[in-house]
Image (spheres, rainbow, N blue to C red):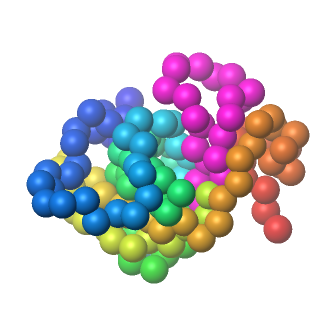
Amino acid sequence: MDINRKLADYLSDSYEGSERRNKPRIYDPFPTTVEGVDANGEAFKCQTVLDNFSAGGLYLRLARRVEQGTELDFVIRLSTAPTNETDRARVVMHGVVLRAEPRPCDTCGVAVASIRYHFLWSDADSGSSIPGEPARA
């Protein structure tokens, strides 16, 4: 099992101060595909789940280290039901890493600001022949 899925139930934020975010957050472990370049300069594509997300960004954990300022691509399936179906609503997001924090089990907690996103309602919407893949310009 992927290490990111093992940590899906671990709560990353123990912050108890007042809420500083200006957009509401959703705290569901939505399955997410992440694609980008890690801190070693190696391209990667992996599966994980979100800790939380909003219109302004997201937070998740990766089994590899990424640097602040790195741009990443995400495909977020808006369902927590276990399924291989691709006809679920999804969000395709491009974002930039605001913060990368070491976490237990050699993982990295990653806070990402959304640069742009759009919703997909079917694979035909993505402009890609591969289900769940973001369209490339």
The answer to whether residue 11 shows anywhere in this view is yes
Q: Which residues are magenta?
A: 73-92
In the image shown, does 17 or 10 lie closer to the viewer?
17
Question: Would you place residue 84 above or below residue 93 in this image?
Answer: above
Going 48% across and 36% down the picture, which residue do you hit?
30
Of all residues shown, which one is farthest toward the bottom? Answer: 69
The image position of residue 81, as x and y in percent, is 52, 20
In the image, is residue 87 part of the stretch drawn in magenta? yes
User: Which image quarter is the C terminus in?
Assistant: bottom right
Quarter where residue 48 is shown: top left
Q: Position of residue 90 (x, y in %)?
A: 66, 40
Main SS of the magenta segment?
loop
Q: Residue drawn 58% across and 54% down? A: 74
Examine the rendered structure and indicate whether residue 119 appears above or below residue 86: below
Q: Is residue 111 left or right of residue 77?
A: left
Closer to the camera, 124 or 118? 118
